[in-house]
Each structure stands twice: as structure tokens, then as C-alpha cells.
Image (cartoon, rainbow, N blue to C red):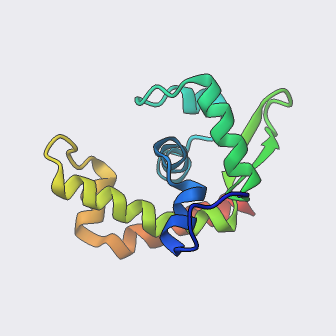
């Protein structure tokens, strides 16, 4: 990232992944197993195609995502998290847990219920899945 607002670590982090669309793309890969452009477009938040293309490009430039040709369809690209992106897992889990705790309109779904019972176990489970995908 070229321009930062300040040298505060929180501000620097938000410059990389802090907009809502980037976090939702990261969530979709981490927790929902989405890998392709078309799968991201199907998310309930309905991201616009130009914003999706931009955010994927930014996340790739920041080495949070890597883009590869799909082994199943050579005309399609898939995205996966890099080790740097995988390291965002505890942050995403905490944001998810906080949102469910303090917003009645955001009920806990299956993963959220697991997080409430055993947050450390959920993080460990997803780390294992994500690291397997990266290799």
C-alpha cells in the first residue's frame, strides 16, 4: 500500500484490509469456501463487479490473496489466501463474534454458534483447512 493515513498500526492495518468489501471477500474465502469471482458475486451483500475486481486486485497486490488458474477449468481463476491472509483469521473470527454479540439483527449461524462454544477450537480448525488449501 503506497499511502497511509498515519503510522498507527491500527490505521496501517485498516489501509490494507479495512473496507467492508475486502473483509467480506476474506470472510467468503476463509469461512465459506468461496474461491472464484462468480462465487464472490453470489454473496448476499451483492458487491458490484467493478468494486469486486478492484478489491481482489488490491488484496492480491498486498499479498493477502493469490490468484491462480483453476485446475478444473483453465479459463477460470481461483483465489486463495496467502500465509499473510490466513493470519487474519483470528481477527475475522473476533469481528464476527463481536457483531453477533452486540447486534440482535445478526444472529449466530452454524459457525457463529461454534465460535460461542469454542472460539480457539474454531480458529484451529479453520487454520488447518486454510493452510491445506495454500499448499
Quadrant hosting residue 131: bottom right
Quadrant assignment for the N terminus: bottom right
The location of residue 120, given as percent across then percent down, is 37, 76
Q: Is residue 92 left or right of residue 74?
A: left
Closer-to-camera residue (85/1): 1
Residue at far right of view: 74
Q: Residue at x 76, y 52 (%)?
A: 61
- Quarter holding residue 115: bottom left
The residue at the far left in this view is: 104
Q: Residue at x 58, y 31 (%)?
A: 39
Image x and y of residue 116, in percent: 23, 65
**One can see residue 79 in this view:** no
User: Residue 110, percent across and down?
Assistant: 29, 50
| Residue at image coords 80%, 30% | 73
Circle count: 0
In the drawing, does residue 81 fall left or right of residue 14?
Answer: right
Asked if residue 97 is positioned above or below residue 40 in the image, the reply reads below
Instruction: Tell me: residue 21, above or below residue 66.
Output: above
Image quarter hosting the C terminus: bottom right
| Residue drawn where x is 56% and y is 55% of the image | 17
Q: In this view, does 72 lie to the left or right of 120?
A: right
Q: Is residue 44 above or below residue 25?
A: above
Residue 100 visible in the picture:
yes
Amino acid at each position: 500500500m503506497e499511502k497511509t493515513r498515519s503510522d498507527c498500526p491500527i490505521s496501517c492495518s485498516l489501509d490494507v484490509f479495512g473496507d467492508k468489501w475486502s473483509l467480506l471477500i476474506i470472510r467468503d474465502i476463509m469461512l465459506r469456501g468461496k474461491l472464484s469471482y462468480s462465487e464472490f458475486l453470489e454473496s448476499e451483500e451483492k458487491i458490484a463487479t467493478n468494486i469486486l475486481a478492484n478489491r481482489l486486485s488490491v488484496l492480491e497486490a498486498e499479498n493477502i490473496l493469490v490468484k491462480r488458474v483453476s485446475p478444473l477449468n483453465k479459463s477460470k481463476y481461483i483465489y486463495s489466501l496467502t500465509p499473510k491472509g490466513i493470519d487474519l483469521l483470528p481477527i475475522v473470527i473476533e469481528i464476527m463474534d463481536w457483531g453477533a454479540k452486540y447486534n440482535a439483527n445478526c444472529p449466530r449461524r452454524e459457525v457463529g454458534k461454534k465460535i460461542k462454544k469454542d472460539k480457539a477450537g474454531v480458529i484451529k480448525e479453520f487454520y488447518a483447512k486454510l493452510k491445506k488449501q495454500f499448499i
